[in-house]
Image: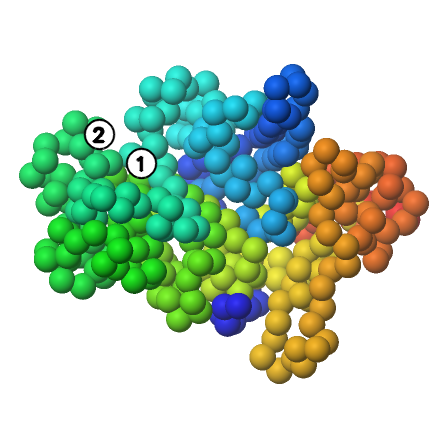
Amino acid sequence: MNAHPMPTSTLSLVRTPLVTVEKLRVDMPLGRSGASVNIVDGVDFTIGVGERMALVGESGSGKSITARALMQLDRVAKVTGKVDFEGTDLLKLSDREMRKLRGSSIAMVFQDPMSFLDPLMTIGDQVAETLRIRGIGKAEARKRALSVLDELGVDRAAERINAYPHEFSGGMRQRVVLAMALVGEPRLLIADEPTTALDVRVQDQVLDLLDDVSTRRGLAVLLITHDLGVVAGFADRVMVMYSGRIVEDGEVGDVFARPRHPYTQGLIKAVPRIDQDHAKLYAIPGAPPPPMNRPNGCTFHPRCDQRFERCSQDVPVMLPVGRTRVACHLHDGKGI
Ligand code: SF4
């Protein structure tokens, strides 16, 4: 667990929207039966230019599938809704147009750098490849690869550009993967649990690096994580996802200072504290429902210690509450 301090306030910034997602829905086919299961159910959000947005929730909440849907990475998925990126609806682009955009406008880094790197290619060639695909000459691509490896703190980059992934430590490999993502100068970086496979010390180094790069380049970041310590230390805003829907979002300081959704409250309560007896660690009871068997009404109701009659019948919608948005009947003004 990362030990970043929890902020109590965050400066409210009005940013130019970079990506606006409306009613995003992702359905996955179930084998060859023709049936499908809904994974992401009508998600709306905006990420501003240079903004760091965190998407949090337990495993299986739909976070990674949401991110992959923005990049159209799951070929079998049925993705509907709208993903407006600087005036272009990404869901309307052809495969060819989307390939062009990946890496140049939007890039993604994943949890396990080793699964992303080709063990038989030098890191220099792998970083330069994004540019080579875009028709940039070998010498220029290599020059830019070296410059970004240098920017990301790879020691003796000029020498190590000819090394292979197995010659790098886990933290250095994650820097190489970041270099591959950033060499095309994207405006949005999607980072899916980028530090989960790393030890705590290296996690902090990678997050500091991401912090520096995003500030220096004005790069927007969508950070997917289950670690609220990472959110507190890195993000401007946070969206909490449960069972395929966003249930709360707002600026990190506002959400952490006053979480309104019982699920967010549970996630925050479950964060281990240094002064806490480990035997008394809180855990939200139960587990998220499988997507093919979601409960009626509020899908969190079987686990919610504040549920009441309406919760198992009506689906709560996202409504503004103070400076945040929340999907919970406790806050819809209709009473208990
Ligand atoms: Fe709990 Fe009801 Fe709110 Fe769902 S709608 S989080 S069950 S209080």
Q: What residue sits right under mark 2 in the picture?
A: 133
Q: Is residue 304 visible?
A: yes
As displayed, is residue 83 above or below residue 124? above
Spot occupied by residue 44 in the image (x, y as percentages of width and height): 59, 35
Q: What residue sits right under mark 1 in the picture?
A: 103
Query: Residue sitting at 29 percent across and 62 percent down?
Result: 169
> Observer-nearest residue: 88 or 268?
268
Question: What amino acid type should be assigned to the residue bearing mark 2?
Answer: Ile
Query: Residue sitting at 63 percent across and 34 percent down?
Result: 39
> Observer-nearest residue: 49 or 173?
173
Q: Which mark is residue 208?
A: none
Give the side of residue 124 with respect to residue 243, left or right. left
Q: Is residue 215 visible?
A: no
Verify CB contact (< 8 Å) between mark 1 and mark 2. yes
What colour scheme was applied to this rendering of the protein?
A: rainbow
Instruction: Look at the numbered disc 1 and give the secondary structure of its residue.
Output: loop
Spot occupied by residue 179 in the image (x, y as percentages of width and height): 26, 49
CA distance for labels 1 and 2: 10 Å
Q: Quadrant of residue 207?
A: bottom left
Spot occupied by residue 336 in the image (x, y as percentages of width and height): 90, 49
Instruction: Look at the numbered disc 2 and give the secondary structure of its residue.
Output: helix
Q: Nearer the viewer, mark 1 or mark 2?
A: 2
